[in-house]
Amino acid sequence: MNLNHPWKKNVLKRLILSFICILLPLYILSMIIYNWGVRTLKDEISKSMISQVSQYYSGLEEEFKRIQTLQYDVLSDDNLNALGAIPESLNDIEKMQSILRLQQRLNAIRNSSAYIVDVYAHIPAIQKNVSALTISTFDQEEFSELKNIPLSLDAKLININGKTYLTASYPFVTPESKKWPLFIVVIEISQEKLKENLKMMVNSPDEGLIFKSSQFEITTSHDAYFDLGTASQMLSGIDTNTAQTVAIKDKQYLAVYSYSHFFGAVLSKYVPVKAVFQPLEKYRSWFVLLLLVSFAIIVVYSLYVYKYIHKPLYKLVKAFRKVEHGDFNEQIEHDFNDEFQYIYTRFNAMLDNLKSLIDQVYKQQLLTHKAELKQLQSQINPHFLYNSLFILNTMTRLGDYDNLERFTNQLGEYFQFITRGDSDEVLLGKEVNHAKVYSEIQAMRFANRNRVEFGDLPDQVGHIMVPRLIVQPIIENAFKYALENRSANGILRVQIVRVHNYLHLIVEDNGEELDDRRIRSLNECLSCPDEAETTGLLNIHQRIRLKFGQDSGLYLERSELGGLKATIRIMITDGGM
């Protein structure tokens, strides 16, 4: 299978995609909160500006209403009414006293507000213009101009020759009337003071105020880009408290309007949008930073996942692919003490176990095949066949049909076990039965010279699986090297004994051919690992150890009968029982 198959990248892509899917709703929620917060702040800033302008305008309106109330109070002044209505009833001294008392009152009005430049009383009856500061000759032209001011229920301030006035006449007459008012009280308003007061609402040079009515126009503009004419045109038609963004000379302004029925004028404060919402820029910067940090987190997370998850997984997959192709020498390492290190360690241990098991099975199969080949070569040979045929011939001649039948059955079982065994392992019961059949065949051959003592198999061990041909070759060696040349009294004893967790299969004889040095040499041979020197006994020893562990095997010693004692020791467990 191709190691670069696309599915191998899906894990990484899915992890990154899942992380993005987690961050994306948070980012969208942050964006919604940010936009909502910006809109809320903008609305609050606009409302704050509207409130500021409205409160200022209300205060200014209250101040001028107070001034106007003082002006109306003067219309009922006794001195003014006497001078305007019945001057002939006063002598010169009384006139002068009335004028002075009137001046004092006008001066009190003038001093009551910084917006007042002067207060005038135009009195046609005495042909005088009495102000808070001076007494001048009556100006008929000026009086006519003041008399002809149209009645307005809204605008109280009027503009005459560039000056701003509050006027009140008594009695009030329409311009079409031919009657003249007895006197007119005029309060001159200082535009400079009004402008200075408006400037108190300006917090930066970029901000400005426009106080505009049909009669006059006052501006505090300091912005070179701000065009008063355009702004004045913009203000037309405004009659309520509102705020809006306007473009003047390609520059954006937040303009706040407040209309006063008392003045019949609009007060507008304009601030460059950039200056108003400058504090919000830091939130935009933080939001951009949030976006960048989110992107950086995704990148770092992707690199982390790639380095600490994807690469170790990919390394493990490559190792498995090599194992699939038969390479069991692959060893993978991991530098970090985490789950992958444990997986890699177990993977390496698994490969070692696999190699060990494969080696054991291979060696066991090889040794079994060698044992079978050796047994076939040594047993199915002319000498063994000749001996078997001679025995059959002798029994036939002698008419020993009972032994003949038993011998032929034993010979059949023997060849059946040898020639039809297709498994590397057999049940211990079958292995012992084969060895017993072989012993009985040999006992018939040497009936007058040797005696076979074959013990019974203990209960509950016959089902144990053992390598094939581990007992019969030892019996064969005993007959071949120890008993074949004896003329009489040969003994072959086979015992099967269980000692705790071990099962001992003991084959011993009373032969005299082996001395102690030879027995020690044979024991040393059993521990030799060189397979090129493998003998039948070493073959049996190695196969038993491969099957049952290092504590099992074949052990040789001097028999109590005088010959060789060969013990096959098999370690058994409860599971093996």
Image: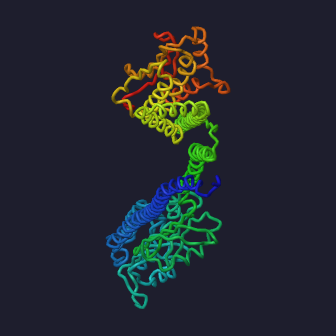
Residue situated in front as seen by the camera: 297 or 229: 297
Measured as percent of width and height from the top left, residue 215 is found at 50, 78
Image height of 479 relative to 347, above or below: above
Q: Position of residue 24 (x, y in %)?
A: 50, 58
* Frontmost residue, 389 versus 460: 389
Q: Position of residue 42 (x, y in %)?
A: 47, 62
Camera sees residue 103 = no
Nearer the observer, 119 or 366: 366
Residue located 49% across and 13% down the image: 510
Camera-side residue of 197 and 331: 331
> Which percent across, then down, holds residue 257?
47, 70
Quadrant of the rendered image containing residue 166: bottom left
Which quadrant of the figure contains the C terminus?
Answer: top left
In the depicted structure, whether residue 137 falls above or below residue 456: below
Count of labels shown?
0
Horizontally, residue 178 falls left or right of residue 467, namely left
The answer to whether any part of residue 189 appears in the image is yes
Q: Is residue 363 left or right of residue 140?
A: right
Q: Picture quarter containing residue 271?
A: bottom right
Which residue does the image show at 59% across and 54% down from the upper left? 9
> Against 182, is 563 above or below?
above
Which residue is most to the top? 516
